[in-house]
Image (spheres, grey):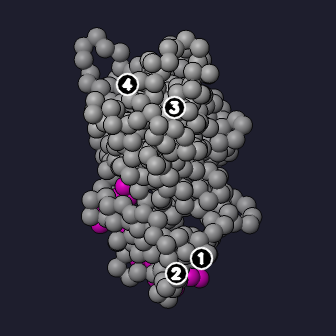
Amino acid sequence: MISINSVRSLSVGAVVHASPQQVSCDIANEAVLLSMSDGEYYGLNEVGASIWQLIQQPRTVIEVRDALLAEYEDIEPAECERAVLSFLAEMIALNLVTVA
Amino acid sequence: MPHASRARSLIDPGRSQPVLTATALRANPTPSDRELLRDYAAFGGVLRSEIAFPELEIARRATRPDWTLLVELSRPSPHALTPLGERQVGAEHYRLWRAADGLRLEHSHAGTFDVSADGRYIRWYHQREALPELVRTIVLGPAIALALELAGFLCLHGSAVSLDGRASAFLAPKYFGKSTLATALTAAGGRLLADDLLVVNAGTPVTVRPGVASVRLWADTAAALPLDAISQTLIHGVKTTVTGFRDEALARTPTALGDIYLLSPVRADAGAPPVARTRLGPMEAAIALARHTKLPDSLVGLRAAGSQLATAAKVAASVPVWRLHVVRDMSRLEAIVRQLIEWSLGNDQH
């Protein structure tokens, strides 16, 4: 379950990586994930799918944020960082992302 | 903002359940049946079988079989097996294993089925106490679905009818009325393609293979439909099996898939239309198709589930997937059928 504390506890220097306990596929700039830990499907919108693509290799949160800032022009760095942290915290809570 | 949306639980207890029934259409297959090798038309191919299938048509011309069902009198060989998954449906339990030379499906009441790695051979290990109808249900359900998945097809739990050469498919758990809709559309001039196991080829165009020319209906539903116009044979049991379809009521060749409907029954409120549809976005559509596979992810395991999901996404990217809000009221079935035909023929794009 996502919480304020879980977002706070994820530092921008943390290295995040897509969990191997899932399968995913791209569809129309979005993505669908099937988690083997809970047997549920998850849909990622375009930005979520971009993050998901980035963390197929281990990356720091800052690297993810900077890559998104380069890709999307209409977002402030602080807002982007908050959004990335929130998204990753949710994905970690769902066992879809691991933290090194 | 990035967003992950949670879909409903994958494991749907209402999906793809073969029904245990005491209605035996034929004596239990015995070793003497090994002499009875017949070729049947099924799923767009030929099933050569050592078990008789009264629900299947005899293949019209001799050809190399696509699948061969053999009855083994020995016990299942103790291969080195890797467990892939399992599934409990009521009193029935399924387990799937990967073996060196294919897959092994175990069913608590029908016994063991080995499917060869190329999907061409299914071996049933004879089990005296297994009900023959159940054995056939497993063969024509999960066992042949495994063989078809090995060949790259997407196997969904649903029905389909060809309307003027364009297939409309209906996906739903049991008891949602997909067989009723398919039969009613067939009686209205469509051609039945499939019921229960829907075999989709995700090529260009996406097509549906003809399945088994047989539909099972509840007795009251069967009584309300003009079945004499489309079928010559009704077998009355726990459900009424409609078979012996007339030539003009069957689609015998792969048919381009025009629309996929996810049945969503609604109450018949006054003033509400008998049927309405809402198109799903590609992501939601892909998830919906993946959730309606004949072989659930809990059974087939991660690798096969990923393959099914990728194929489902490919289909969802090229075929409209709709949520069909349909009233549960047989007295309005005619209006529902009329609307579905109009949509299919392109007379009404709403």
- Tell me which secondary structure the magenta stretch mostly adopts: loop
Q: CA distance from mark 4 to mark 3?
A: 46 Å
Q: Is there any visible trace of residue B328 in the rendered image?
A: no
Q: Which residue is mark 1?
A: B100
For the record, the magenta segment spans: B17-37
Front one among B208 and B115: B115
Circles 2 and 1: CB distance less than 8 Å? yes
Residue in the foreground of this view, choosing between A49 and B5: A49
Subunit of mark 3? A
Residue, x 53% and y 19% (percent of image)? B342
Query: Dot 3 corresponds to which residue?
Result: A62
Q: Badge 4 local density, few (<14 within 10 Å), some, or many (20+)? A: some
For marks 2 and 1, give the CA distance: 7 Å
Of tags 2 and 3, the one toward the viewer is 3
In this view, the mark in front (1 or 4)? 1
B213 lies above or below A87: below
Residue B66 in magenta stretch = no
Give the Cα separation between the discs numbered 4 and 2. Answer: 48 Å
**Mark pair 1, 3: CA separation:** 46 Å
Residue at the spot of label 2: B80
Q: Are marks 1 and 3 in contact (CB under 8 Å)?
A: no
